[in-house]
Amino acid sequence: MNVHEPIDPKSPAMKDNQSEPAPVRRRTGRRWKGRLALLGPGLALVAALACGAWSHYALSREVADTALQSRNLVPEVRVTTVQPSSGTEIVTLPATTSAFSVANVFARASGYIDKREVDIGDRVKAGQLLAEIVAPELDHQIAQADATLEQLRAALQQAQANSELAKVTWDRDNPLVSKGWLTAQQGTIDVQTLKAQQAAVSVAQANVVAEEAQVQVLHQQKIYQRVVAPFDGVITQRNVDIGSLVQADATSGTFMFTIMQGNVIRTQVFVPQDHAFGLEPGIDAVVHVPEIPDRTFPGKVTRIANALQPGSRTLLTEIDIPNPDGVLTPGIYCTIDLHIPRKAPSFTIPADAIIFNESGVQVAVVENGAVHLRKVAVIRDLGEEVEVNSGVKQGDRLILNPAVDLAEGSKVTTAPAVAQVS
């Protein structure tokens, strides 16, 4: 029978097949089902193994391709060009303001305060009256000294007259003594009398000079009764009032006022040794006060000590700050920017270019497309930038944010350079 011909259900073969017993047909169906049940897991296992093998092969190829690309890849890096630091180094140090001049005014005349013209906080001019002292007994002493001076001057005139008389007598007797008309004893008397009168004149003159000096002292004490300001400033302390008794004594005189000169403010700072060698008078300085953030106060270095403090290795420096409007007052905390000229050249580089590892502090320099690691010496940390004085030169191109696995001699390409602002 041709297998391509359709089977007629009514054909004898079909009839013979249908004529088979039912148990035989059931056993044959089960056999085929069992074979199919055993074949299904095997096919699934083979498919899973094939998929795993293919995935492993694909992953291996991908790793190999990646490794090949890594070996052949030349990374692109960002670089910056090294520029020299500016010729001036700005050093910021804490300081406290003080008055340019401070004077404690003491009583130079004893007596009672008759007038007090100023109080704490008053601004005064040089020569302005602060207080006036009354001392009636001083006026009496001056009158007595004047009278004594007149007496001494009269005594001087008398001595001068006696001296003139003695000289005239000697001039008249001298020729007579030489001719023998008068005794030699008379001549000796005349000579000694003249010398005595001349000495009396000298004594009278000295007495007059001494009394004149005493009168000047008393008159100066009279002047001291008017207490005046020694310079332009502000009264910061007052210890007397009207009616107060004051004493004029070199060691225990009465302390009356304190006056400070405020048109120029002085500050003292201690400059560390590493910045002290470039410091000299005339260097610019700028004062910043935290409570006055919108204003700066420029000044100049006026005085420096010629020796460093042994304990702190710092140099005492004084800066004078003009203060014509009186905004600054003594005793304010402030910071001072000193513009110190550099004594040694240095370079400013971004902190992003610094590499810290077991080899120390380094930077990655790009030359002819290759990386070269160089050690640098950081002399100052400015936050986003650092100053170095070795390891690099002007024009070097440094890699920014270098990779941790960056090695000496690695090939790189550079993105457009970022100019470093000095």
Image: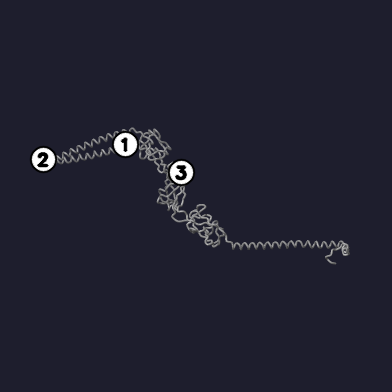
- State the SS at label 3: loop
Q: Tell me residue 73's x, y (percent).
A: 59, 61
Front tag of 2 and 3: 3
Q: Amino acid at mark 3?
A: Ile
Whichever of labels 2 and 3 marks the residue nearer the N terminus, that label is: 2
Q: How crowded is the residue under tag 2: few (<14 C-alpha within 10 Å), some, or many (20+)?
A: few
Q: Which residue lies at the image location 55% right of the left edge and 60% below the top edge? A: 413
Residue indicated by mark 3 = 332
Q: Are marks 1 and 2 in contact (CB under 8 Å)?
A: no
Whichever of labels 1 and 2 marks the residue nearer the N terminus, that label is: 2
Q: Quadrant of the N terminus?
A: bottom right
Q: How is the image coloured?
A: one colour
Q: CA distance from mark 2 to mark 3?
A: 95 Å
Front tag of 1 and 2: 1
Q: How crowded is the residue under tag 3: few (<14 C-alpha within 10 Å), some, or many (20+)?
A: some
As drawn, 89 above or below 109: below
Whichever of labels 1 and 3 marks the residue nearer the N terminus, that label is: 1
Q: Are marks 1 and 3 in contact (CB under 8 Å)?
A: no
The outermost residue toward the bottom is 1
Front tag of 1 and 3: 3
Q: Is residue 400 left or right of residue 11?
A: left
Residue indicated by mark 1 = 219
Q: Amino acid at mark 2?
A: Trp
Q: Tell me residue 54's x, y (percent).
A: 69, 62
Quarter of image, res 324: top left
Q: Tell me residue 206's x, y (percent).
A: 25, 39
The disc at residue 172 is none
Residue indicated by mark 2 = 181
Q: How many marks?
A: 3
Q: CA distance from mark 1 to mark 3?
A: 43 Å
Q: Are marks 2 and 3 in contact (CB under 8 Å)?
A: no
Q: Amino acid at mark 1?
A: His
